[in-house]
Amino acid sequence: MKDLTCRMTHFALVMAFAVSATGSMLVAQTPLRTLLVGVDHRKSISLNGPWHYLVEQPPARELYDEKGNIRDNGYALNTHPNISSGPHNSEYDFSTAPTMKIPGDWNTQDPTLFHFEGVVWFQRDFQFQPTPATRTFFHVGAANYRSVVWVNGKRLCNHEGGFTPYDCDATSLLKPGNNFVVIAVDSTRHQDDIPSVNYDWFNYGGITRDVSLVTVPSEFIDDYDVHLKRGASFSAADANTVSGYVHVEGAGEGRSVTVRIPEANASTTAVTDGNGKAMFEVKVNGLQLWSPGSPKLYKVELQAGTDALTDDIGFRDIRVDGTRILLNGKAIALQGANMHAEAPIRGGRTNTDEDVKNVFSMLHQIHANFVRLAHYPHDERMVRQADREGLMVWSEIPLWQRISFSKQEVYDKAVVMLHEMIRRDRNKAAIIFWSVSNETPNNADRTRFLTALANEARHEDQTRLITSALIGPRVSEDRIMQEDPLMDALDVVGQNQYIGWYEGTAEDADRKTWILPQKPFIMSEFGAEAKFGNHGGPHDRWTEEQQVNVLQHQFAMIRKIPQMRGVTPWVLMDFRSSTRNIPKLQDGYNRKGLFSEKMEKKMSVPLVVKTYTEDPAVKPE
Ligand code: GCB
C-alpha cells in the first residue's frame, strides 16, 4: 500500500474517525494516490495478452534484499545473458522465457504453479508514441497480492491488495517506440495482510485483471460521483435532481466542468475549487430511476478542458426505514446468493465477459435480484453487468475473520482498500451495500476498528448502506440472540450461521427463536456441502438430498424472523479452497454450491427457485 516512488498527484488525505467505548480515536492519515475512475470507458492501449514469466522461490532474492526491501537491480532491469562472448552478466532472460495470458492467475495456467504461493515476475514489450501535453498511466485492474511495477528498468510504483485497481503515472519513464514493463507479483500470505494468512478460498496469484495504458490530457478527470440527489427523505415526485462532483486532476481553482445527460436534455456547468473539485447539481425532467425491474442507465457525458468521458450511470435511492430497506421509496426483499470470483467451468479467477455471462446465467436460473460478491471486490465487468441487468449488489473488502485489528498499520491498509473499492464502483447504481468485513471476532479492538471503517465508508459515500456479515450470536437453549456491538455502526446487518452443517441438524432450525434488534437483517450465509451427483437420505452428509434438507429448514426458520429483508445461501457455485481436502468429496473445493464448478445444477436449485418465486423466505416489510 505504501507507495515509495509513484508520484502522488491527487494527494487526498483520508481521515477516519470513531470514538471507541474508551473514548480513544482511530484516525488514519493515508495519502491516496490518483486512481482513475471509469477506465473501462476511456480509450486505452490494452496490455492484455501473453507476458513472459519467471518464477522465484522464497526468499525471492531478486525481488527482496536481506532486509526485505525491494531491489531495483535484479530481474527488473530485463537484461539478457551473454551467450556467446563478453563478460558474464545476468542469469535470466525474459525474452526466451515461457509466456502466460494476462489477465490470468498463474495457478491455472502452469501445472507446476498450481499450489505456488510466492513471487512470479512478468515482462512484456510494447510500442508507445508519446503525445505532447498528456500524461500516461499504467492501469492494473488487480494483482494478487503485492505487486511492483518497473517501466524501462525504473521503478514506477508498488501496490498492496489483491482485488482493487491501481494507476501509476508512467509519463516520465515512457519513450517513443519500444518500451518494456516488468511486474513482480508476490502472493505470499502474511498475518498483517488483508485478508490475513488463513481464509476459505484459493490464493490465485498473478495479474488477475486487465492491464492497460491510459493517456489523458495534463489536466484530466480522475474521479467523479454522479448520483441521484439525496435528501433527508425520499419522494418520487422530488426525485429529479442529479448531483455530485467531478474532480479534475492537475487543475486549480476556476476550471469549468460540464455534465450532460443528452437523453434527458439535461446539462450543467460547474467550476472547480482550489482542490480541483467541482460540485454540481442538475434538474432532470422525467428522470427514470434505476431498479431491478427497470435498470435504466443514462449516458452521462463529463467534460473538463480537453478531457471528456462518457459513463453509463443509473440513478436510485436506497435507504433504511426501521427494519425496512427502501429502494426508491419502496420496501424491498433481497433474494440471491453469495458468489466467489471463481470462473465457472474453466476455473481460475473471473475476468472475462464469458465468465460473467456464465455467472449471470446461474443467478438468473435461481431468480436472484441480489448477489453478495464475497469476500472482496470482483472484476468490474461483474458490476457493470449487474448495472445493466438490474441486479442489486453487496460489495465487500477482504477483512475476513482473524485480521490484526489492534494494529494501526492494518487499519491504514483497510482504509485504502475501502477507498479503492468505493472509488472504482461508486457510480454503479447496482451496488447498494458496502460491506466492511466478514465474520470477525467480537472484541474491543475489532469493534473500534470496524466502527471507524464503517464511519469512513459512510463519510465517503452517503448514497449507500453500510453492512458487515456477523457470526456468533449467543445461544441459550432455543433462543439465539445477536448482541454484537458492531451492529450499532451498521445500517443493515448480515448474519451468518450454519445450523444443520457445522452445528446440529437441519431440523434444529425449526426450534430456534431469533432475538434481534430492530434493524434490517440479511441472512447472509447458511448452507451445507453436497457433491454433485452424490445421493442418499436427507441426513446423509455430502449428499444433494442433505443440502436440500438443510436449505428447506433454513428457509422455514428465516421466514419466521420479522427483521429479515434478505437471503443469500452460501454459495452459488462450488469454489476452490486449499482448506477443503476430503478426497472424492471435496478434492480442493468448498462444495456448498447450488451449482457445481462446472455449472451442474444440484437438487437444491429447484427448491431455491420455488422459494424465491412462490413462497419467499423474506418479505419487504
Ligand atoms: C463462512 C465464511 C465463508 C466460508 C463458509 C464455509 O462462514 O464466511 O467464507 O466459505 O463459512 O463454507 O465454511
Image (cartoon, rainbow, N blue to C red):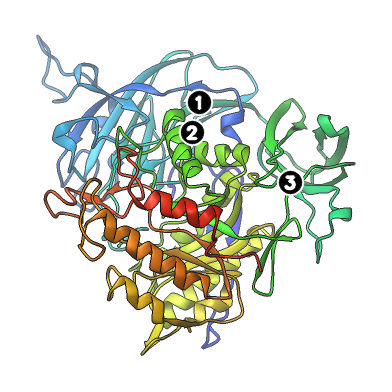
- Secondary structure under tag 3 reads loop
Residue at the disc numbered 2: 139
Closer to the camera: disc 2 or disc 3?
3
Give the mark nearer the N terminus: 2 vs 3. 2
> Which percent across, then down, holds residue 483?
48, 84
Residue at the disc numbered 1: 213
Is 121 in front, or is 574? Answer: 574
Residue sitting at x 90%, y 41%: 285
Picture layout, residue 64 above or below residue 108: below
> Which percent across, then down, holds residue 340?
38, 48
User: Does residue 519 appear left or right of residue 351 in this picture?
Assistant: right
Picture layout, residue 296 above or below residue 162: above
What is the spatial separation of the Cα atoms under label 1 and label 3, in whole angstroms? 30 Å
What is the spatial separation of the Cα atoms under label 2 and label 3, in whole angstroms? 28 Å
> Which percent across, then down, holds residue 550?
34, 65
Q: For label 1, count other residues whose C-alpha is less than 10 Å away and answer few (under 14), some (14-19) or many (20+).
A: many
Amino acid on which disc 1 is placed: Leu
Contact between labelled residues 1 and 2, with CB atoms less than 8 Å apart? yes
Residue sitting at x 39%, y 37%: 350
Q: In the current view of this chain or complex, which residue is farthest to the top? A: 84
> Which percent across, then down, holds residue 371?
50, 51
For the C terminus, give its image quadrant.
Answer: bottom right
Quadrant in which residue 276 is drawn: top right
User: Does residue 568 appear left or right of residue 197 in this picture?
Assistant: right
Residue at the disc numbered 3: 315
Is 321 in front, or is 463? Answer: 321
Amino acid on which disc 2 is placed: His
Residue sitting at x 28%, y 73%: 505
Quadrant in which residue 29 is drawn: bottom right
Which image quarter has ligand 1? bottom left
Amino acid on which disc 3 is placed: Phe
